[in-house]
Amino acid sequence: MLKTNKDQSVKTEIAENLLPLYHVMQPMENKNVLILGYGREGQATLHMLQKLVPGAKLTVADIREQKLPEGVHGIFG
């Protein structure tokens, strides 16, 4: 499949929109971050933080026990 200029334009726009978010999250490196709840939003937040703040120490707290990615701590109950 050939990539069109529109595909590249969308990727550039996404990258430009994420840049300010990266600058806000950069101070979170090497910090402890707690995500409350591991539903749809919690999973999306975890995924985003893993990509944008790879040095953060991530913990998820949820009422039900959940399977978490390697390296992510969990608090359940």
Image: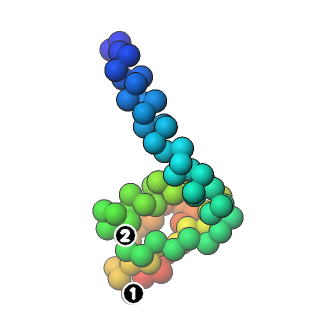
Whole-number angstrom distance, CA of label 1 to CA of label 2:
12 Å
The way the protein has been coloured in the rendering is rainbow
Task: Report if residue 3 is visible in the image.
Answer: no
Q: Residue at x 54, y 44 (%)?
A: 19
Q: Amino acid at mark 1?
A: Gly
Disc 1 residue crowd, few under 14, some 14–19, many 20+, Cα 10 Å: few
Q: Secondary structure at mark 2?
A: loop
Q: Which residue is mark 2?
A: 38
Count of marks, rendered view? 2
The percent position of residue 57, horizontal first and vertical second, equals 61, 67
Note whether 70 is above or below 38 in the view shown. Answer: above
Tell me if residue 75 comes above or below residue 41 in the rendering.
below
Residue shown at the point (63%, 56%) measured from the top left:
26
* Left or right of 33, for residue 46: left
Q: Amino acid at mark 2?
A: Tyr
* Residue 60, horizontal then vertical, whole percent: 47, 73
Using a 10 Å C-alpha cutoff, classify the residue at mark 2 as few (fewer than 14 neighbours), some (14 to 19) or many (20 or more): many
Identify the residue at horizontal 65%, vertical 69% (top origin): 31
Q: Residue furthest bottom?
A: 77
Near-viewer residue (44 or 71): 44
Residue 32 quadrant: bottom right
**Which residue is under mark 1?**
77
Mark number displayed over residue 55: none
